[in-house]
Image: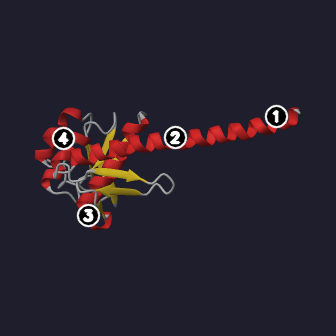
């Protein structure tokens, strides 16, 4: 009788845990969808270009939809829009995790036009994390964008190739 009861309760516990897993996953996915959408719309110059973002709970494939609920093929997005979407995903994940971790961004403004660059410089970089490391070229963070991030900077380093040592060396400061 005890063995039968143990088996019965085991099946019930398994079913409850399975149901809990599905509900918890759905809750967190919905939260993440909202945070990614919010981040993307903050960064994109076309306000409310994307109406909703859906994440498939089994494949974790991301789909984006425009105002008329028509799916936007991510392959049809420009390189800059794909970069903004990638940043929005990272930003959404960081917000959802509520954990503090450094953010390192290599060539942060490479494919973006001036309006999208300004959106990233003003909105994303100051709030991405408590510690953000930008690995930019001299053409990306110029004087115009530097003035926006300067209040948030602790240090800046310039890394340059030195032919005499056949390698790179760094010094405090920036390109200008």
> Nearer the observer, disc 2 or disc 3?
2
> Nearer the observer, disc 3 or disc 4?
3
Q: Residue furthest left?
A: 144
Mark sitting earlier along the chain (1/4):
1
Tag 1–tag 2 contact (CB < 8 Å): no
Tell me if residue 77 comes above or below residue 157 in the rendering.
below
Between the C-alphas of marks 2 and 4, the distance is 36 Å
Between the C-alphas of marks 2 and 3, the distance is 32 Å
The image's mark for residue 23 is 2
- Category of crowding for the residue at label 4, using alpha-carbon neighbours closer than 10 angstroms: few (below 14), some (14–19), many (at least 20): some
Report which residue position mark 3 lands on: 77
Report which residue position mark 4 lands on: 122
Mark sitting earlier along the chain (2/3):
2
Q: Residue furthest bottom?
A: 76
Indicate left or right for 139 with 37 as reference: left
Report which residue position mark 1 lands on: 5
> Nearer the observer, disc 1 or disc 2?
1
Q: Residue at x 38, y 52 (%)?
A: 54
Q: Is residue 146 visible?
A: yes
> Nearer the observer, disc 1 or disc 3?
1
Between the C-alphas of marks 1 and 4, the distance is 61 Å
At which x and y percent is residue 122? 18, 41
Q: Residue furthest right?
A: 1
At which x and y percent is residue 15? 66, 41
């Amino acid at each position: 009788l005890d063995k039968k009861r143990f088996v019965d309760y085991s099946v019930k516990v398994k079913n409850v845990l399975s149901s809990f897993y599905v509900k918890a996953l759905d809750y967190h996915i919905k939260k993440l969808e909202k945070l990614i959408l919010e981040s993307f719309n903050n960064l994109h110059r076309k306000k409310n270009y994307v109406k909703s973002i859906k994440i498939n709970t089994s494949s974790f494939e991301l789909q984006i939809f425009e105002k008329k609920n028509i799916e936007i093929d991510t392959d049809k997005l420009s390189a800059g829009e794909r970069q903004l979407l990638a940043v929005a995903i990272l930003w959404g994940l960081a917000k959802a995790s509520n954990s503090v971790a450094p953010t390192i961004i290599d060539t942060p403004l490479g494919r973006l036009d001036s309006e999208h660059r300004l959106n990233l410089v003003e909105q994303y970089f100051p709030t991405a994390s408590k510690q953000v490391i930008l690995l930019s070229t001299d053409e990306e963070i110029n004087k115009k964008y530097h003035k926006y991030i300067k209040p948030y900077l602790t240090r800046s380093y310039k890394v340059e190739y030195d032919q005499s040592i056949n390698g790179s060396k760094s010094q405090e400061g920036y390109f200008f």
